[in-house]
Image (tube, rainbow, N blue to C red):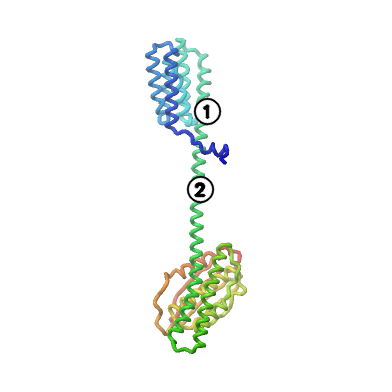
Amino acid sequence: MVTYREALRRVRAPGPRAISVASVTVCLFLTVLAVKTPWAPLPRVVIAAAALVATGAVWFRDRWPTAVAAVGAGAYALSGNPGPLLIGLFSGAGARLGARFAALAVIGVAGFVAQQWVDDGRLGTDALVPALAATAAVLVPGGYVATRRELTRSLRERAERAEAERHLRDEQARAAERGRIAREMHDVLAHKVTLISLHAGGLEVNPGAAPARIEREAALIRGTAQEALEELRKIVGVLRAGHDDIFPDLRRLVESWAAAGNIVTLHGDLDTLPVATARAAYRLVQEGLTNAHKHAFGAPVTVSVTGSPQDGITITVTNERSLQPAAAPSGAGAGLVGLAERFRLIGGTVRGAPDDGGGWRLEGRLPGDTHDQNAAGG
């Protein structure tokens, strides 16, 4: 049910053209009365001509209010029709205390005084006070209405700008969330699919393997796929809940790669690290192992976690030079970019470069006391 206030909000204020039409109509009506009565001691032709000229000038009240007021002052003196003068004064009153406001005040007083002079044939000082009062009675409300209109327009523009900024912030938040989802999905899928590919490749190159080995490799492929699905479910749940308190298991990650036939050595662990730091370190190791498999298949890999939560953490994944040809590049190459962004959000850095032995070294550094930034690192 629409309330009374809501109905009022839906009513649109009349536009400038509608107000001009109404103003001209009122002035024409007053012109008819001025000619019929008449309101001035001059011939009716003069009254009609002066009033009609001033009435036509009213149409331009928004563009040239001072000129309309001046024409209206002359018409008031000649015809007795005050409409154009009052409308000109009211329309131009928004100039506040500037030069135009002073000019309107002089025109208003002169118009009211001149009208008495034409009617009485004399110019007395007793007409000055009523002229001043009548001019002020028009200019003050006109200035108030103009100021209120300007304030309303300013508030409306601010509200529209705030609404546009809110929509922009919402879009940026959605884009950031989509980026976060993409990074999480990439981290999980790239790692698990690489493991599945590794196990499947082992079966492919050994078609005559014993049934027990085939069964073991198939079980590993099935288990890895189930783990991928489970991690994806966790990611979706975390993204919906907005937080993640699940501590990553680095040793299990390394063991899964070792079980696939890789030579992986782990020094250190994540047990003493804050959750956000541990997650970032886990993702770096995941990315490093995946890239080592892609570009240095069969080469030994060393994973090292050094430092402390107070002094800062350094995580390195180093692989030796591979004696086998590198696999064809796959993927969009966005893994390291996303990883660098993840570290940047919690104040860390990521750097990848060849080492002295011809291998590759991926290193991530995180400053001390990052546990207060858990929200950023999720």
Q: Where is residue 10 shown, x and y percent of the image?
A: 51, 38
Residue identifier under label 2: 163
Residue under the point 42% across and 16% down: 79
The answer to which image quadrant residue 295 occupies is bottom left
Residue under the point 50% across and 77% down: 317
Residue under the point 50% across and 40% down: 154
Instruction: Tell me the kind of residue under disc 1.
Output: Pro
- Label 1 Cα neighbours within 10 Å, binned few <14 / some 14-19 / many ≥20: some
- Label 2 Cα neighbours within 10 Å, binned few <14 / some 14-19 / many ≥20: few
- Comparing marks 1 and 2, which lies closer to the viewer? 2
Residue identifier under label 1: 141
Q: Is residue 368 above or below residue 205?
A: above
Residue under the point 48% across and 69% down: 186
The answer to which image quadrant residue 376 occupies is bottom right
Q: How many marks?
A: 2
Q: Where is residue 175 shown, x and y percent of the image?
A: 48, 59
Q: Nearer the viewer, residue 219 or 246?
A: 219
Q: Which mark is residue 95?
A: none
Q: CA distance from mark 1 to mark 2?
A: 32 Å
Instruction: Tell me the kind of residue under disc 2.
Output: Glu
Q: Where is residue 341 shown, x and y percent of the image?
A: 49, 66
SS under mark 1: helix
Q: Is residue 185 above or below residue 141?
A: below
Q: Nearer the viewer, residue 102 or 68?
A: 68
The answer to which image quadrant residue 78 occupies is top left
